[in-house]
Image (tube, helix red, strand yellow):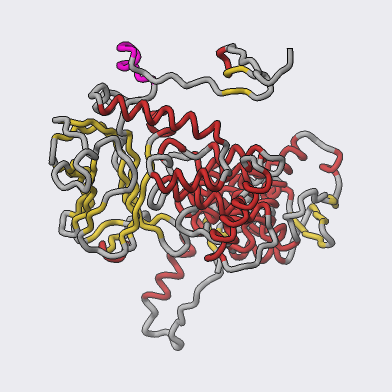
Amino acid sequence: MGNSFSRHHAAPVVNDRLRATPLSLQTRKRHIDSVYDNPSKSSPDPVRKKRLKSTSEYIYDALFVNGENSDITIRSLGKEWKLHKVYLRQAKYFRSLYDNKWKESTMETIDLQIPDSNIDVKSLDITFGSLYSEIVMIPPSKVIPILAAASLIQLDGLMQQCAEVMKETICMENVFGYLKAASMYGLEDVCRQSISWFETNLMLRQSRELLSEMHPELLTDVVSSPNLVVIQIEMDIYTMLKKWLYLRIHPSYSGDFKSILSTADAYFHQEAESTNTFFLESEHGRPYSDVFKALRLQHIIRDFVSCRELERDRIIPWSWMSQQYRQQWLTMLRVEQSIDSGPTEFNNDTFESNSLRCGRMLLRDADHCWRWNGYSFGLDLLISYSSHAPRTITFRRNVRSQRCSSSVSLSSSRSIVYRVTVASVNDKGQTALRKSTENTPLNLQKEQEQIVLTLGGESAPDQSGTLRPWKSYFPLIVTATFQLVNDLESPELNSSGNSIKPFPCFDEETRTLGGAGVVLEDSSAED
């Protein structure tokens, strides 16, 4: 199967045999139609309707396939094409060649050099043939070679058609190749859609194949993205990165992917005991530091079990974690003493880069109610999905039912900023449905319920506009991003002297506290 595209342009005229005025064509068509539709009763033989070959098909067969009246031969990769200059001029490369009177412009045969290994004879054949036809068939399996050939002769229309095929067919089997090709040939839309595919599927489709092919730079971009679909909480991103890191160090790992986490745990625990250092500070680990810096550590250390695992693995350096421990502790005190009741104003950039990311998969169209684990500064937020039309996502600030009476804030109101997204993904990892709120501030009273997203009735249009029943979109992915407290240096807290300044980190080499210029004396040094 291939994708067909109309080029939407009239074919150039090459010789007198092909010249016909629009009027003569229309007159001829009306005559044929009248004979077909109103055969004479006196005619001895009834006229049988027969589809005539279109002008486009005739031009393609006569001029491209058979090379009739060719005035230029293109030779490349061991094959010759009998072509026509007037058609070749549709490509910028050849138009420039003839307009600027390069030495090749007077040659009857041009040897076309192919510096790109992606280009083969078939892709060149399709590319040259597209100059003679209104319809171009682009098989997804050949789209990258065709794109490369179109790029070589600077045929922008065909390149754009290749981009449309790539965006429509992106999946696990081709996404890495598509991203590489799109970057090489300047298809920004395809690059963005490839990155979007990773943001949607990295957590959903974890596999040895997917993680093994993720380069550190690409993974850093995806993990740091505000559009990353997180299933459960930030700690699950760390767990995924731990699997990825183990595969980078052990590319020949052949065990079951389901057991890779326990294998990775054992490896990093043994490394920590034998080297007495944090892995990302070791020679083997430093190249991967940027990937782990993309994690939002402040939202991992909200849970005791997660803290215990971080410290046991000794992958992330203590200097990174101690800063976050300090900031979270001071933020907790600020909330406990009613200095901070949640963000009164927010910055979109800070919200996108620092806020808490959560997600959940709803397997069937039934009522659901849940909360995401972790300390939330005294705010117990229950999230509900109603399966009754109009389907809704609702927040409720829960105060009454608590396992620990001191775990919830009793302040009359708490402020948050949120964004909620509901999405459905098909079997290729492409988004079939997406509904989302804006970055929205919300003030919640005790036990207050608030509908934050209305999804609709019994059906909803997919990305192509086709109306489908809601049940067909399951499993459904619900993701949320939250800001529960003020920024570390919010203007309001700054003016009152209650902001939290980063603590300078100790530098082992200079024996100073970062930019503070404080030199620490070494008590073990001799006089």
**Position of the C terminus by quadrant:** top right
Specify the farthest residue to the front: 527
- Residue name at image x 30 percent, y 38 percent: 376
**373 up-or-down from 101: above or below:** below
Report if residue 33 is visible in the image: yes
Q: Nearer the viewer, residue 228 or 383?
A: 383
- Residue name at image x 16 percent, y 47 percent: 401
Percent position (x, y) of residue 361? 34, 57
* 469 magenta-colored: no
Res 522 quadrant in image = top right
303 relative to 170 in the view: left or right: left
Percent position (x, y) of residue 439? 31, 34
- Residue name at image x 23 percent, y 58 percent: 368
Res 257 quadrant in image = bottom right
500 relative to 518 in the view: left or right: left
**483 up-or-down from 23: above or below:** above
Q: Which residues are magenta?
A: 489-497
**Position of the N terminus by quadrant:** bottom right
Res 299 quadrant in image = top left
Percent position (x, y) of residue 40? 38, 80
Report if residue 138 is visible in the image: no
Percent position (x, y) of residue 387? 19, 59
